Amino acid sequence: MGPGDLEFILKGLKPIADKRLLVGAESLDDAAVYALGEDDAIVHSVDIFTPVVDEPRSYGRIAAANALSDIYAMGAKPVLAVNVLCFSEEVIPKSVVREILRGGYEKAAEAGVAIGGGHSIEDRELKYGLSVVGIVERNCLITNSNAKPGDLLILTKPLGIGLITTGIKSGVARARTIRKVKSIMEELNLAPSEAMVEYGAHACTDITGFGFLGHAFELAQASGVDLEIDFSSLPVMPEAYEMLKAEAIAGGLWTNKAYVMAHVETVGLSDDEVNIMCDPQTSGGLLISIPKPGAIALLRALKARGMGYAAIVGKVLAKGKGRIIVRK
């Protein structure tokens, strides 16, 4: 579902008021947060999607990493998950489904997360993901609504994932490119989550289906600020441009673009460069808003942990209505 459709569906819905619900749907944050007491809270999210790669075990690992990312984006520690699985034995052999689950269990184990069962639905279109519960100290909670003027913006994974996974489905992505994008999607956002809490991040969101600009806009709007992005600093996989040339483009790119560009001003960018920023990502990186001294230390820490794509990609401007300026 595109961001505009989601906004329409949620408009006017009023859930039961509960003062213990610290983060709900109002700010379109990455997960719901519910207070357990004065000091602690649980963080809950669910994510499920159709295969983005051909290898079942890798698909399971990617789906699990993607679901866990919502918890990491809040500065929380995921502790418990349940599987969510849609498939039909008439279409997908049970042996393949077992490998998908195996991949999910492997990634959960890497994160130290227990999987306590799950739920399956008869569906001819295969889908897999996790419903995840995390825990967080309330004073360490990071949302998408606290970015401050003067903060720098750090992105931890490269853009172009959606274009390349579409290229896999279209048969135009090369084997080397497929290995590369699998590795990026399977990577947990654990390290940047822990580090951003340590170095005093103000706000964060993970970059997934709404693309870089869509999620950046959500952060800007929720925080009541405007953003400036330096496109030349954005980590972008060069193979993504090859996919654009081959017209391996997911429909979600156009949906994202139609929604967000009314809030974006570009200076000196090509259509391809704008499309890269609207490309829907799977298991993308974190976009972190953090004061300048912390940003320098955080970037150094991420590089030391092997996150070579991490980069300072922009800054938070003055208070505003969520406008984004992208310069080249």
Image (tube, grey):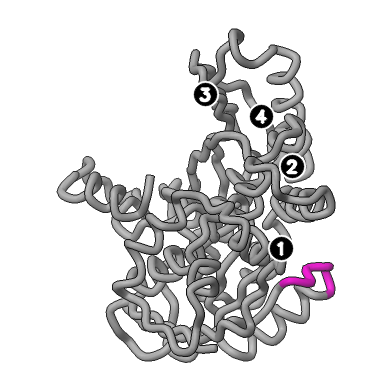
> Which residue in the rendered view is the most extreme toward the front?
246
Instruction: Give the foreground label among 1 and 3.
Output: 1
Checking the image for residue 195, the label placed there is none
**First reached walking from the N terminus: tag 3 or tag 4:** 4
Instruction: Give the foreground label among 3 and 4.
Output: 3
Measured as percent of width and height from the top left, residue 241 is found at: 64, 66
Mark 4, other Cα within 10 Å: few <14 / some 14–19 / many ≥20: some
Which residue type carries mark 3?
Glu
Read off the residue under disc 3.
Answer: 125
Which residue type carries mark 1?
Glu
Name the quadrant of the C terminus: bottom right
* Residue displayed at 51% across by 69% down: 277
Read off the residue under disc 2.
Answer: 112
Which residue type carries mark 2?
Gly
| Res. 184 image quadrant | bottom right
Marks 3/4 in contact by CB < 8 Å: the verdict is: no
Would you say the magenta stretch is mainly helix, strand or loop?
A: loop
Residue 308 among magenta residues = yes
Give the spatial CA distance, label 2 vs label 4: 10 Å
Segment colored magenta: 304-309
* Residue displayed at 73% across by 20% down: 96
Measured as percent of width and height from the top left, residue 134 is found at: 57, 45
Kind of element beneath mark 1:
helix
Marks 1/3 in contact by CB < 8 Å: the verdict is: no
**First reached walking from the N terminus: tag 1 or tag 3:** 3
User: For this rendering, which residue is in front, 125 or 106?
Assistant: 125
Kind of element beneath mark 2:
loop
User: For this rendering, which residue is in front, 19 or 297?
Assistant: 297
Name the quadrant of the N terminus: top left
Read off the residue under disc 4.
Answer: 115
